[in-house]
Image (cartoon, rainbow, N blue to C red):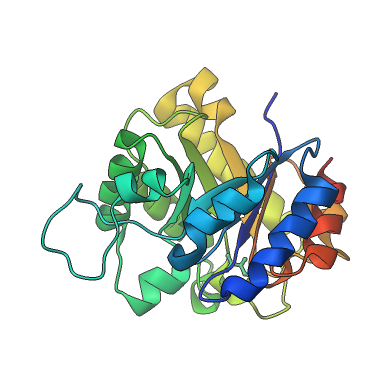
């Protein structure tokens, strides 16, 4: 039985003033009936971990470098994230694929580095609107899944997030049939590659305009094991009800 996961991606939002929101979330959902993860900007990571200590809410990074250390100005290694209190890291988010030209091979290298450092990699996949309109969704997802996921993936160390690019931050959400089709396809790909036991243990999150008003319907879809939430994770009054819908 896969434990559900509500993961919040703060993206490039949040300064010290917003740390109080974590205290509020810890008070209301610090021991939720599902796993809860907050990925703040790197500048807040260690203070977020402190604010959430004593609660069951985990913290994660939003990216890491593929190397353990070295001459990579501005980058952060997986070990540094772990040292700052992170247990997870989001990798291959479509905004990084677009803004930084990250491809599947690099995402896979970063995932391997994350796992080697003891983190859980939350690996993002998703098709663009033109790819969906062209009927290429499953081809795109299959290629990204194969190319971005490291060998030997396990439920403890890898989470997959299906995030259609056209649904992120737009208020547009695929139909539940469309979500189910992709999640079932990912599940089949995972069990084929990693075997029935490991492939079945890897959680598959849906991400893209999840809100309190649509969360329950999305979470009822087969093979949806939780959500990766952007905008609605910034406010406890929005993220709280999404967590509630998962419990
Ligand atoms: C995301 O960026 O991962 C995301 C799902 O964003 P939003 O929930 O705002 O669409």
On the rendered structure, is 33 left or right of 145? right
Q: Is residue 205 left or right of residue 126?
A: right
**Please, is residue 176 above or below residue 97 in the view?**
above
Rendered position, 78 above or below 74: above
Counting the numbered discs, the total is: 0
Q: Is residue 85 visible?
A: yes
Q: Nearer the viewer, residue 136 or 109?
A: 109
Comparing 35 with 159, the one in front is 35
Residue that lies at the very extreme toward the top in this rendered image? 197
- Residue 122 visible within the image: no
Give the residue displayed 56% in from the left and 50% down from the top. Answer: 49
Q: Please tell me which residue is depicted at 36% across the width and 79% down the height of the picture.
A: 99
* Residue 131 image point, x, y percent: 49, 72
Residue that appears at 32% across and 37% down: 117
The x, y position of residue 225, in whole percent, is: 69, 41
Q: Is residue 80 above or below residue 19?
A: above
What percent of the width, then of the height, locates residue 140?
Answer: 44, 60
Pick the front one: 178 or 99: 99
Q: Quadrant of residue 10?
A: bottom right
Q: Quadrant of ligand 1?
A: bottom right
Residue 96 is left or right of residue 127, and the answer is left
Q: Can you say which quadrant of the picture contains the N terminus?
A: top right
Q: Position of residue 87 (x, y in %)?
A: 49, 41
Residue lying at 73% horizontally and 78% vertically, measured from the top left:
171
- Report the quarter where the C terminus lies: top right
């Amino acid at each position: 039985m896969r434990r559900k996961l509500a993961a919040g991606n703060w993206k490039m939002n949040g300064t010290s003033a917003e740390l109080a929101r974590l205290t509020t979330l810890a008070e209301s959902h610090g021991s939720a009936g599902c796993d809860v993860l907050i990925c703040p900007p790197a500048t807040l990571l260690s203070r977020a971990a402190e604010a959430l200590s004593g609660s069951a809410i985990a913290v994660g990074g939003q990216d890491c470098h593929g190397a353990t250390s070295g001459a990579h100005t501005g980058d952060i290694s997986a070990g540094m994230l772990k040292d700052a209190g992170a247990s997870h890291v989001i990798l291959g988010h479509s905004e990084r694929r677009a803004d930084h030209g990250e491809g599947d091979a690099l995402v896979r290298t970063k995932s391997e580095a994350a796992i080697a450092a003891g983190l859980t990699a939350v690996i993002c996949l998703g098709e663009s609107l033109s790819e969906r309109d062209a009927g290429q969704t499953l081809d795109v997802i299959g290629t990204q899944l194969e190319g971005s996921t490291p060998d030997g993936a396990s439920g403890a160390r890898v989470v997959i997030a299906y995030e259609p690019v056209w649904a992120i931050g737009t208020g547009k959400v695929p139909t539940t049939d469309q979500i189910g089709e992709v999640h079932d396809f990912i599940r089949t790909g995972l069990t084929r590659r990693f075997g029935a036991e490991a492939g079945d243990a890897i959680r598959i999150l849906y991400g893209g305009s999840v809100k309190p008003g649509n969360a329950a319907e999305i979470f009822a879809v087969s093979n949806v094991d939780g959500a990766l939430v952007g905008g609605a994770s910034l406010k406890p009054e929005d993220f709280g009800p999404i967590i509630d819908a998962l419990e």
